[in-house]
Amino acid sequence: MAKIAIVTGASSGIGREFAHQLAERPEVEEVWALARGEEKLQLLAAEITAKPVRTFTVDVSDPAQVATFFETVEAEKPEITWFANNAGWGKFCRCDELTPEESLSMIATNCSGVVNMAIRALPYMPAGAHMINTGSASAFQPLPYVGLYGATKAFVRSYSRAMNKEVKRQGVTVTCMCPYWVGTNFFDNVHEHPGNAVVTKYEVMYKPEDVVRYAIRDARRGKDMSVYGMVNKFQHVAAKLLPQRLVMWVFLKKQGLK
Ligand SMILES: NC(=O)c1ccc[n+]([C@@H]2O[C@H](COP(=O)([O-])OP(=O)(O)OC[C@H]3O[C@@H](n4cnc5c(N)ncnc54)[C@H](OP(=O)(O)O)[C@@H]3O)[C@@H](O)[C@H]2O)c1
């Protein structure tokens, strides 16, 4: 039985970094990299030399594609020693500037996709295995103009922390990684109206390699959350202590919004 790492959203940014770093781990013999675009996955596979990389074109928001992927998993019965459940995207705009279809599609990727992948992967995860679900610092409080995206990540955070308790007896840890702003292609598509971007002030932009290294370390320590960076840690604590209305007001002020 091969010991594998599965990474969704592996073709870019944080997921690409997960694929690189997990390929270096001794308990990983193969990396299975998932995303929608095959071309970028092939580039990733060519970059990683430490272990074999298998690529799978899977849209995690499509239950039929996820089911087909797990037919391969069931046929080969690998041990999933690491699972970076990471695919996701967001838009920063007023709620009604997203069409209902776009809104539901974001939920289908960031929430339903994460759940579908997680519960299908669990039976193949032995004691000692780690699942890292990608949340976000936007999960700590409501953020106007990041509203739906933040709400999907609040779902991931809550779901993951509860799941961590539930699967403890299986010997599996579940960690919700909650990155602050990270320099990736995420921002290429985040503005619904490029000429009229609303959220534009990013006081710090962390590096994907640092965020991922920290998350892997936290997962190995059995933590149910990974919050990388001083600014991020500060916001995490502030969002716990201050009234959410005040936190939203500060955010809007910082962005020059009302
Ligand atoms: N960058 C940040 O500041 C930041 C902060 C907090 C949290 N995050 C979260 O981190 C995760 C990774 O984002 P990133 O920053 O690395 O952005 P990114 O560079 O845009 O990467 C997103 C990855 O997800 C894949 N993807 C998107 N929708 C998918 C779907 N329906 N099915 C399968 N794969 C899909 C993309 O590939 P394809 O387009 O080819 O499918 C790509 O590989 C996301 O969950 C994001 O919400 C990012």
Image (spheres, grey):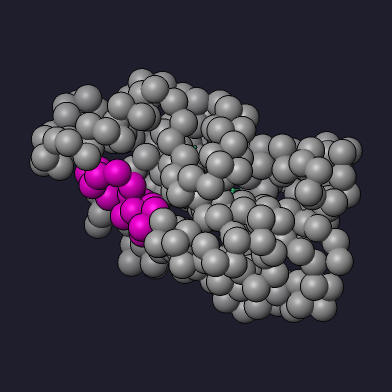
Image spot of residue 256 (x, y percent) = 20, 26
Q: Looking at the image, can residue 166 be seen?
A: yes
* Residue nearer the viewer, 123 or 102: 123
The residue under the point 81% across, 58% down is 3
Q: Looking at the image, can residue 72 be seen?
A: no
Q: Looking at the image, how many numbered discs can be counted on the residues?
A: 0
* Residue nearer the viewer, 50 or 249: 50
- In the image, taking residue 222 as reference, residue 75 lies left or right, namely right
Vertical side of 59 occupied by 26: above or below: above
* Residue nearer the viewer, 184 or 139: 139
Q: Is residue 128 magenta?
A: no
- In the image, taking residue 131 as reference, residue 189 lies left or right, namely left
- Give the residue furthest to the front: 169
- In the image, taking residue 147 as reference, residue 33 lies left or right, namely right
The residue under the point 39% across, 67% down is 104
Image spot of residue 25 (x, y percent) = 77, 41
Q: Quadrant of the N terminus?
A: bottom right
Q: Answer with the quarter of the image where residue 151 lies.
A: bottom left
Q: Which residues are magenta?
A: 139-158
Q: Answer with the quarter of the image where residue 26 lies.
A: top right
The residue under the point 46% across, 49% down is 224
- In the image, taking residue 87 as reference, residue 231 lies left or right, namely left
Image spot of residue 137 (x, y percent) = 37, 40
Q: Main secondary structure of the magenta part?
A: helix
Image spot of residue 46 (x, y percent) = 86, 41
The residue under the point 46% across, 67% down is 166
Q: Is residue 155 magenta?
A: yes
Q: Quadrant of the C terminus?
A: top left
